[in-house]
Structure formats: C-alpha cells, structure tokens
Image: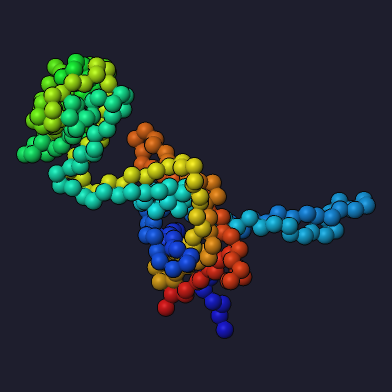
Amino acid sequence: MTLSDDRVLFGIHSIAPYDRTTGEFFGILKVLGDSELSLAASAVQLFGGANKFPIADETTQINSQFTSAVKSAPDFLFEKWIGASVATIAAAALGTVGTITNKKGTSAVSATVGIASVNALSGSEDDLATGHYIVKVVTATTVDVYVDTDIDFSIPGATSKLYVNDLLKITVTPLTVPDSGSTVTIPDYGLELVGGSGTVAMTVDDTAEFDAVAEHGGISDITLGQATITLPEFGFFAYGARRADNSIFRIHAFKAKSSTGMVVPLSEGAFMITNLVTTLLYDNAQDAVAIARAVAGA
C-alpha cells in the first residue's frame, strides 16, 4: 500500500455570511486577499525546583478568529462588520435630486416666500453634477449656489463646469428666485429652483442644502456610528480556491462576530483593502466554533 496524497490547501475563493436564524445569505465576498483561520492557544506552565523545564502545561484559552483582506465593499459588509444601517435608492438614468431643506434660518426654503423645491431640469439631466449643494440668500429675492466637489465637472457629453471662487461658488451672478411657483435654472448644472407660491421674501444669509447625483446605477446611504449600534452575530462559509486536482477546502463558522470593527482605507492611487477580524464564538447547539470540510479531488 502506498501513501495517500498529501492534503494541500491553496488560496481563498469566497466568503458567504448568513443569517443564523433563517440560514439566508447576505451575499458573497469574492475579491479577497490573504485570509487566515487562527486557533491561537494560551497556556500556563508549572515550574519547580532546579528544573529549568516545565513540569506541566495546561491550556487556559483558545482565541478563535478568522481574518481576511477584503477588497470589495457591498452593503452587508458595513451592516455585519460595523453595525451600520443602509438605505438604498434604485438606479436612475436621469439622476436623483434630493429634497432641499433649510440649513441656517427658516426663510430660504418656504412653500410661499422662498424656494419651494429643487428639481432636475427636464431635458438637461446629462448636466447633473454629483455633490452636496448649498444655496445662500444674497438679497430678499436672490441666491448664490455652492457645491462641495468638482468630481463631475468634466463628464463627457455634459456641459463643462468651473468654480467661480475659492469658496466653491458655482453661480457667476446671483439667481433670482421667481414668485408664484415659477422656476430659475442653475446654469450648466441641469437643475432648477422652484419659487414659492406667493411673493418671494427671504432673509439675507439664510442657507439651504440638498444633494444631487448624476445618472447612476443605485445609491446606498450607509449610516455609521449610531448611538444604538450593535455588531450582529452571523454564520459564514469560507472556501479555499479549487485546486487543479479538484480538491476543495471549506470552513463553516456557526457563530461569528466582528471583533475589531472595520477600517475603510482611501489610500492614494490604491484600491481599498480592509482587513477584517472576525471572532468565532462557541455554538452550544453545534458544540463547536466551526467545522472544516476537506473534499478530495476525484
């Protein structure tokens, strides 16, 4: 009888976390870097007399963790590893313009005497520029507009855009907010302000704000750091890469929990890689923290 082939593990293929109650999957992580299952034990040793070597050794704790370098950022990653809540907006070929609200004072946005709403300008949606906009009252009837980023100022096919000054203003001259529900265009930005139903009379230096997003395939608003944050428990399956001999190695963790939260690096000229540390907790029902399955190739 000859020796069996050595079991050799190679690489990482995927991680699929799931709901421990229903078994339903949250999704799958496949853009992964170095991953590791660690069952690191600590122990106490007994020494005595003149003997320089331990007389006895007893394990005290085993720190069971799974670490992985994750290179993608789906919604569930933030929900399960940092306890975030996520609200989504469906894809919109004509972009999405948020609701305008007062920031300073109460006169800039008013259904009667201020700005009633802000909309995408019909037929000019290609000019929408993603950003957070500030509208500042200059006189009782005029406003200037500012935006926080120039990330969409040079989209192919859209009107080219420039800041007017270092304060991120985008209106060359103040815009007159019209009376009786009429509109005024924010030039070059595919946006229009709708005046109130009455006679416009705003307070100088009051401000309002809104968000706009150019044509997109969907939006996720990920709320981080809420007072009621909890890091949920979940299970997961982690697969090593399929080898050339068709062997497969899988780790099934029954009860896992993010133990260090997560870091979202935004390094210069580099893709995001977040190193996640997940603690594998003891599951009473399974009498284990995980099961590793090795499938031999055939």
Describe residue 129's horizontal placement relative to residue 249 as left or right.
Answer: left
Residue positioned 13% across, 28% down in the render = 198
| Extreme residue in the bottom direction | 1
Describe residue 243's horizontal placement relative to residue 287 as left or right.
Answer: left
Residue 115 visible in the displayed image: no
Describe residue 58's horizontal placement relative to residue 91 as left or right.
Answer: right
273 in relation to 38, above or below: above
Q: Quadrant of the C terminus?
A: bottom left
Residue 256: give x, y in percent of width and height: 53, 59
Residue positioned 23% across, 39% down in the render = 98
Question: Could you say which quadrant of the image residue 59 lies in?
Answer: bottom right
Question: Could you say which quadrant of the image residue 210 lies in?
Answer: top left
Residue 110 visible in the displayed image: yes
Q: How many marks?
A: 0
Residue positioned 49% across, 42% down in the render = 227
| Extreme residue in the left direction | 123
Residue 102: give x, y in percent of width and height: 28, 29
Residue 54: give x, y in percent of width and height: 83, 55
- Asked which colour scheme the image uses, the reply is rainbow
- Residue closest to the eye, 221 or 115: 115
